[in-house]
Image (cartoon, rainbow, N blue to C red):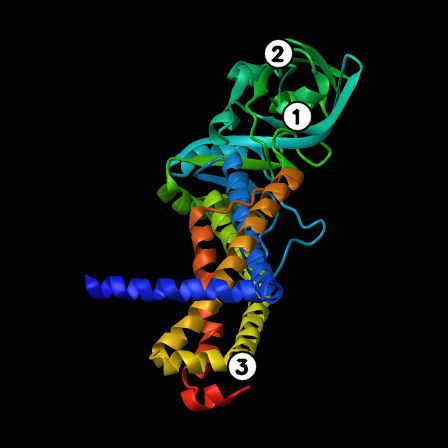
Amino acid sequence: MTDILNTLAGWGVNVAIAFTALRTNLMRSILTTLGVMIGVFSVILAVAVGNGAQVSVTQQIATLGSNMAIVVPEPERPNGPPRPGDRGRLTERDGEAIARQVPGVLAVAPQLRTSVQLVTGGRSANTQAVGSTEAFASISNLGTSDGRFLTKSDIGSAARVVVIGQTVADKLFVDGNPVGEKVRINRVPFTVIGLLESKGSNLGNDNDDQIVVPITTLRQRLSTATTQGPDDVTLLFVGFEDEETLVAGDREIKDLLRARYRVSKGKITPFTVRTTKEIAETSGQVTQIFQAVLVAIASISLLVGGIGIMNIMLVSVTERTREIGLRMALGAKRSDIRNQFLVEAAVLCIIGGAIGLLLAMVAAAIFQQVADFPAPIGLDTALMAIAFSAVIGLVFGGYPAIRASRLSPIEALRSE
C-alpha cells in the first residue's frame, strides 16, 4: 500500500511540475495545444457526422417498413444501372400471384405514384400521391394521428378520399383539423379522412410530404402516364412474416415473375427485387466507408499536432538542460526525468483534446439545428477523445522524454 501511495505521489508531483512549466511558457503552450485541439475537433466531428449518416439511413429504411421486399419493373443488370427505356412491366395480378404462391408473405401492397397539386381555401401544395391499398399501412408501418386509413371498401368503390401527411396538412390547414375537410387534387374533389403520423425527415427527404389515395381512384381520376396497361403498377411492397422468410422470398419472387413472363434461362430478369435487409446492409457499408474516409482525412491534422508536440518538447528539453542536470545531481533517477516530460506532453495533449471535444460538441449541435442532420457524440466517443489525446502525448513526447533522461548530469550542469 505504501509503494502505491508513493507512486501516486510521484505522478502527482510530475503533474504539478508539468502545469508549472506550461504556465511559465503560456503562449507557447497554447500554440502547441492548438494542433492537437484542431486534430481532435476534426476527428470527433468526422465520427459524429459518420454516425449521423448511419442513423439517418437507418431511420430512412425504417420508414419503409421491416421485413419487406420492394419489386420494381426495372431489369436487374449485373454490369450497371438500367439503360434509358430499359423497363419491364408489373401488374396488380403479379402482386396477387406473389401473395398466393410465395411462402411467408403476409400482404402485398401495389402502388402507383404521381405528382399532384392540392388546393383548398386559397392555399395550395405540390406533393407526391401514392395510390395503394389498405395493406400499405401495415407493410410500411404507417399510422394515422387523426382520422383513419384507407379501407377495402374505399379501394373497391374508388372513393375520392385521401390521407395526407403532416407537411401537406401544415401547408393547407394552418389553423384547423384537416379530417373531414374538402380538397381538390388536380381539380378533382376529395375528402380528407385521415392525417398520417409524422415520420420526420432524413437526409433532406421529408417523409411527411405525401398523400395516400385508393389505387383505383388514382388510376381513374389522376394522371398515371408512367404505366402502360389497365392494371400496371409502379412498384410492389411485399411484407413477410420474419427475416428468414424475407431472405428466402427474394429468390422466390424472382423465380415466380420469370415464370409468369416466360423469361428463359440466361436472359436478363425484367424485375429488380430489393429487401430492406439488403438495403440496410448496403447503406451500412457505404456509411462506414464514408466515415472511415472522413476520419482518415481528419487524422492528418492529429499527426501534424503530434509532430508539433514533439518539436516543442525537444525545444523544452534543450532549454531546461541545467534543470535536468540539477535534478539528477539531487538524486532524481532517469525514470523520474523521463516521466516528468512524458506527463508534460500528455497534459498538453489532454488539454488540447478536451478543448477540441467541447468545440466539436458545439459544432455538432449547431450542425444539427441548422442542417437538421443528426451528429451524435456519445460518452464513449468523448472518453475515447480524451484517452486518445493522452496517447498522442505519450507517443510523440516519448522521444524527447527519453532524450532528456539520457543526458549526463555533469554535461547538463555545464550547459549554459
Amino acid type of the residue that numbered disc 2 sits on in the rendered structure: Val
**Residues tagged 2 and 3 counted as in contact (Cβ below 8 A):** no
**Residue at the right extreme of this rendering:** 122
Q: Is residue 336 left or right of residue 346?
A: left
Q: Is residue 354 left or right of residue 171?
A: left
Q: CA distance from mark 2 to mark 1?
A: 14 Å
Quadrant for the C terminus, please: bottom right
Sequence-wise, the earlier of marks 2 and 3 is 2
Q: CA distance from mark 2 to mark 3?
A: 79 Å
**Residue at the top extreme of this rendering:** 180
Q: Position of residue 388 (x, y in %)?
A: 46, 62
Q: Which residue is mark 2?
A: 179
**How many residues crowd mark 3 within 10 Å: few (<14), some (14–19), many (20+)?**
some
**Residues tagged 2 and 1 counted as in contact (Cβ below 8 A):** no
Residue 167: mark in rendering? 1
Amino acid type of the residue that numbered disc 1 sits on in the rendered structure: Thr
Q: Position of residue 21 (x, y in %)?
A: 51, 67
Look at discs 2 and 3 and give the one toward the viewer: 3
Q: Position of residue 364 (x, y in %)?
A: 59, 46
Is residue 239 shown to the viewer in this render?
A: yes
The total number of labels drawn is 3
**Residue at the left extreme of this rendering:** 1
Nearer to us in this view, 3 or 107: 3
Q: Residue at x 44, y 77 (%)?
A: 401
**How many residues crowd mark 1 within 10 Å: few (<14), some (14–19), many (20+)?**
many
Q: Residue at x 28, y 66 (%)?
A: 7
Instruction: Describe the element under mark 2 as helix, strand or loop.
Output: loop
Q: Is residue 363 shown above or below 132?
A: below
Look at discs 3 and 1 and give the one toward the viewer: 3
Residue 318: mark in rendering? 3
Sequence-wise, the earlier of marks 2 and 1 is 1
Q: Is residue 296 left or right of residue 339?
A: right
